[in-house]
Amino acid sequence: MFESTPDLSVSTVAEIVRLALAPVFLLSGIGAFLNVLASRLSRIVDRSRDIEPMLLASRGTEHDRWITDLKILDRRMSLINWATGLSVTSAILTCLVVVLLFAANLVRTKLGLEIAWLFIASMLSIGAAFFIFLIETAVAARAVRVRTELLQHTVDDNG
């Protein structure tokens, strides 16, 4: 399974770095996606904090509307948290791919199958995160519909 002395020539190390470059770019993309998720989560939290005092001061149908809004925001927070967890899992798995690419070459062992499975798991994880993000954006889009009573509101100029 292990060969004797690893070849640590510059060309060998350069080849390993070349192989590891694609997963490193993937990490960069995952980082950008995590930034988007964190930004959305921050806006959701800010919006829920804005609603809390209005909810406490409201009664009747207005109170029910604020409760509905908070429930939607809570659902969106949950979805963002799932997408974040899956994205971080993908990043960790991708890091393991890079580490194993180097380790396999350094100790001259055949870890190709393990590296492939880790990469597949990473892609499944980030794919699931993107899918959950799609659901969150759909929930957000449905929640920002303008209420019918506002669209039909008129002002009486007689008074």
Image (spheres, rainbow, N blue to C red):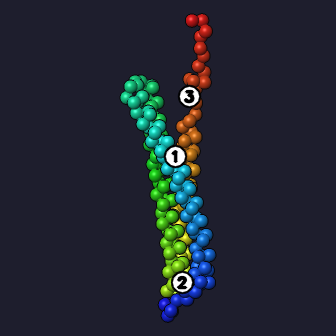
Q: Amino acid at mark 2?
A: Asn
Q: Which comes before the other along the chain, label 1 or label 3?
A: 1
> Residue 70 occupies which quadrant of the picture?
top left
* Mark 2–mark 1 distance (CA, rounded to whole Å): 41 Å
Give the residue displayed 59% in from the left and 19% down from the top.
153
Q: Nearer the viewer, mark 1 or mark 3?
A: 1
Judging by the rendered image, the residue that carries numbered circle 3 is: 147
Q: Is residue 104 above or below residue 141?
A: below
Q: Amino acid at mark 1?
A: Arg
Residue 62 percent coordinates (x, y)? 45, 26
* Mark 1–mark 3 distance (CA, rounded to whole Å): 23 Å
Give the residue displayed 54% in from the left and 50% down from the top.
36
Label 1: which secondary element: helix
Q: Nearer the viewer, mark 3 or mark 2?
A: 2
Tell which of 151 and 101 is nearer to you.
101
Report the quarter where the C terminus lies: top right
Judging by the rendered image, the residue that carries numbered circle 2 is: 105
* Mark 3–mark 2 distance (CA, rounded to whole Å): 62 Å
Residue 119 percent coordinates (x, y)? 55, 71
Judging by the rendered image, the residue that carries numbered circle 1 is: 40
Give the residue displayed 62% in from the left and 84% down from the top.
11
Tell which of 90 and 99 is nearer to you.
99
